[in-house]
Amino acid sequence: METREITTETLVLSPVDLAQLFSHAERVFEGRFELERVVSGSPTRVLFVARDLVLKRRAGLRLHLVPGGQNRRWFEAETELMAALDHPSLRSVYAAGYEGDWAYRVSQWIEGESLAHAVARGPRSIPFVLHLARDLFSALEYAHSEQIILRRIIPTTVLMDRTQRAVVTDLRYANRCLKLAEPDQEESAVSFLAPETWHGHYGEPASDIYSVGALLYFAITGQPPASDPRKIRPPSELRSTTPQILDRLLLRALAHDPRDRYFSAAEMAEHLASVMGEFETPVGVPPASTAKQDPEAWEGQLRRALGDQYELLDELGVGGFGSVYRVRDLSLEREVALKVLHPYLTTNPEVVERFRTEAQLAAKLDHPNIVSIYGIGSRAGLLWYTMEYIAGPNLAQLLEIEGPMPLDRWTTMMEQALGALQHAHAQGLVHRDLKPENIVIDGRDGGVQITDFGLALALHGEHARSRHSHSGTPEYAAPEQMFGEPVDRRADLYALSVVGFQALTGRTPFSEGSIEAVLARKAAGDLPDVHRFREDIPEGILEVLHRGAARDPDDRFPSAAAYLEALRAARRAGSRGPLQWVRGLFRSPVTQRP
């Protein structure tokens, strides 16, 4: 039998032999479900992710292990309630039964993350909060029409699926289950419960409005509201960009007296829509797609996704993160570049969140040598961002066509690139994947335009706030970046120095052999001697280039500004002839190696 990984993220099963339980469950459900892993559990309940072999889809298979008693009746009551519901934002049950001493139920498996997990990365955007409100209000209206009070809706029991739709997954403490419910042991839940439900009371529709108000407060501020409603601070005090109207809406929903809250979920939803306008579509997590394997199918999917926003003109290039197209923005009537990310990169909610964060930071950059980002969007399973269209080749294409750069053009390119990095670094943004393909040459004036700021960090799996990174392209990435050591702006200076070596010589210094071989050569030290490939480069220029590519970050220039100043000094000295005293410009010169 194939051995499967068993994860125990929240497992509390000390009285249970988990491996034995897993094996026994495989035998019991053989032919109906293929068990993948354990997700969570307690001494009485276990949740598996399984594949439904009849319906050919993933499912959540929850077992209740202990027969008889109030806890089993509680499980049965919740199962009956979930099976009776039919709403996309309330998890429902499509099968249930008994196997020996076990009771079980089967529900559709939701691919996504909890609201608690999402907010742990930071407060949510206002469009996200508005969509969360829409989904939860709709679920409440449906439940209340069925005489069901949910009572307990907390961040860990609200899942955001790949389209960012909210789904309430836990109905154990709803009014129809309350007579059988055991005391709630989760202290953090109190902040999300209406005061009138604290001591096991059934509550009323206004109690659910309080819970949803608390969830929206949590999503906006990143903090739960005070457990005492009379001490709740306005959201704008915790997040200054919160619209004032949301302060009033949420504080009304969180009123201590139920009579001071909204009368119904529909009333609050209508008030929210009337003051906030139409909900914008948030960037969700597109489902995995293989359409790119078939060019015709891919183009059809892309054209459908772009709809009446953009007219697809032609493909500009394909890279490790996605494909770049020239499109016409039909609203603004201008040509822009549109980068569609590979669908496999964006099946993880954290990746999409990092991408959004990095895109927002990059959009704040305003420099003549940095490509401007206009916006991000998502539709039909595809995720993209739009940016300024620069008519011209990237540096890799230019070098392939024209060969190594003349020295004057090379120094101009380096100075412009360093100016762009100086601006980005001052905004706290490190590129992390600087390479010739990300340096575009403007066909109008030959100027440099750097693109894809922050994309490497966003799409390679590191948290946006982490200073450790394994991202980047091996030929150009700094040694500390490839080894997963702390990364800062000096990693960009290293990458630019390697790019500069290639622009002078027509070849990359570390590209031959495996990644392991590249790592070994980088760990050994400096760039190869440029004079092996061309002899017209002044010694001072090479000193600058080698210091920029020093193995140890402390031996490099401390900033792009210092690098730029040294390069300009070397350029001036080189224009007067080869002067060896240029070495004295540098405090920590790096010994050149063959």
Image (cartoon, helix red, strand yellow):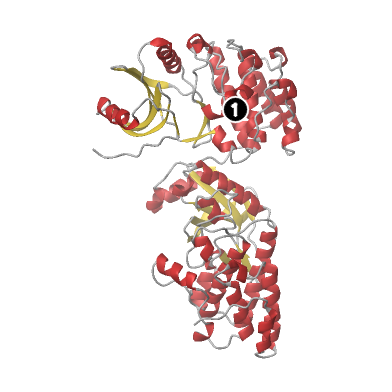
Give the quadrant of residue 576: bottom right
Looking at this view, is 34 or 91 the one in front? 34
Looking at this view, is 506 or 258 the one in front? 258
Look at 65% across and 88% down and name the residue there: 580
- Tell me if I can see residue 308 in this picture: no
Question: In the drawing, does residue 143 fall left or right of residue 288?
Answer: right
- Tell me if I can see residue 261 in this picture: yes
Look at 36% across and 11% down and name the residue there: 68
Q: Which amino acid does label 1 sit on?
A: Arg
x and y, in percent, of residue 56 in the image: 32, 32
x and y, in percent, of residue 551 in the image: 54, 70
| Residue ranking furthest to the front | 15
Looking at this view, is 447 or 326 the one in front? 447
Characterize the local packing of mark 1: few (<14), some (14-19) or many (20 or more) Cα atoms within 10 angstroms. Answer: many
**Residue topped by disc 1:** 134
For mark 1, give the secondary structure: helix
As displayed, is residue 247 above or below residue 67?
below
As displayed, is residue 117 above or below residue 517?
above
x and y, in percent, of residue 586 in the image: 67, 78
